[in-house]
Amino acid sequence: MRHLMNPLDFSVEELDKLFDLAEDISVNPSKYAHACEGKKLASCFYEPSTRTRLSFEAAMLNLGGQVLGFSDASSSSASKGESVSDTIRIISCYADICAMRHPKEGAPMVAASRSGIPVINAGDGGHQHPTQTLTDLMTIRALKHRLNNFTIGLCGDLKFGRTVHSLIGALIRYSGIRFIFISPPELKVPDYITDLLREKGIEYEEVIRLEDCMADLDLLYMTRVQRERFFNEEDYVRLKDFYILNNEKMSLAKDDMLVLHPLPRVNEISVEVDDDPRAVYFKQAQYGVYVRMALILTLLEITV
Ligand code: CP
C-alpha cells in the first residue's frame, strides 16, 4: 500500500506516468467514468480548503466513486480530543482512500503509519502540499511541454508557504532549473532549502523587488501572505500587500512567461491580470482535478 506525503514519494518516471494518465483523463473523461465504482474517498479536512477538498471530491465523483468526510475539525471527534491515529483507524473501516489536510506538520504522516488505506497529504501546516505540486507540474508540462530548463520566480510568503517548499523539492530533480526567490526579508525561503540548493549546485538568487527580475522569468509562481501562519496581526498587516502583480509589472515580462498561483488569491495579483493570456492560475485549478483523478487510480492500483 502506498501513501503520498511528499512529491518525492514518486520518482520522476512515476510522475511522468501519472501526468500521462492525467492528460488521457482530460481528453477521454468518459473512459474513466466508472473506474472507481464501489470505492469511497474519505475527505478529512482539519483546516479550511476550497480547491483541494472540492477537487478531490470532484475527482472521486468523476471516477464513479463516492465521497464521505468532514470539512472542519470542529464537526469531527477531534473536537473531543480524538487523535489522528485513532481517527484514521476508524476511517480505514469506512473508506478505501483518504485525503487529509491538517494544520500540524506531520499529522498525515502519523495517520499513514496507522492507516489500513492509502493516505494522501492534502497540506500539513507550513510543511508540504504534494498534490498542489502535482497540479503545478502538470500545468507547466501541459502548457510548456517540458519540466526542465526554466528560470522560475517564487514570490511572496516563501517562509511558511508549503506549496513553495513542495514545488522547489520536486523541481530540483529536473535539469536546468534556476530559482529566483522574491520575498521580504521576514518571509525568506528557509535555510534548509537554500542549504540543499547549494549542496546540489543549483543556481538561485534572492531578491526583494519583483520588478528587478520580471524580465528574466519563464515562470512566476505567486503566493499569498498567509494570515493563519502569523503569530501576530501587526506583522501580517505590515507584509500582506508587499507584492501586488499588476499589468504594469506584467509589461516587463516575457511574452510567453506563465503566472501560476496555488490560490486562494487575496491582493497579490490584481484582477486586471486575470485577462492576460499568461495568467494560468484558473486553468491550473482545472488540471488539479485531472491529476487527483490520476493519483486516486494510481494509489488504488486501478487500471482502465
Ligand atoms: N491551493 C489550495 O490548497 O487551495 P485550498 O486551500 O482552497 O485547498
Image: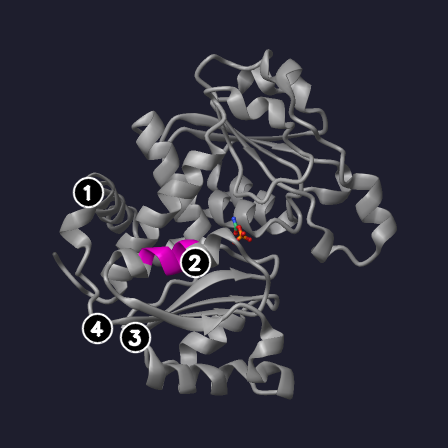
Please report the residue visible at 53 percent of the width from the left and 48 percent of the height from the top.
163
Magenta-tinted stretch = 55-59
Amino acid, disc 2? Asn
Dot 4 lies on which element? loop
State the quadrant of the C terminus. Answer: bottom left
Asked if marks 4 and 3 touch (Cβ < 8 Å), the reply is: no
Q: CA distance from mark 1 to mark 3?
A: 24 Å
Mark 4 Cα shell of 10 Å, populated few (<14), some (14-19), many (≥20) = few
Name the mark on residue 6: 2
Q: CA distance from mark 3 to mark 2?
A: 20 Å
The residue where tag 1 is placed is 24
Please report the residue visible at 30 percent of the width from the left and 72 percent of the height from the top.
40
The mark that comes first in sequence, 3 or 2, is 2
The residue where tag 4 is placed is 38
The residue where tag 3 is placed is 96
Q: CA distance from mark 4 to mark 3?
A: 9 Å
Quick one: which residue is furthest to the right in this view?
234
Q: Position of residue 1 (x, y in %)?
A: 27, 73
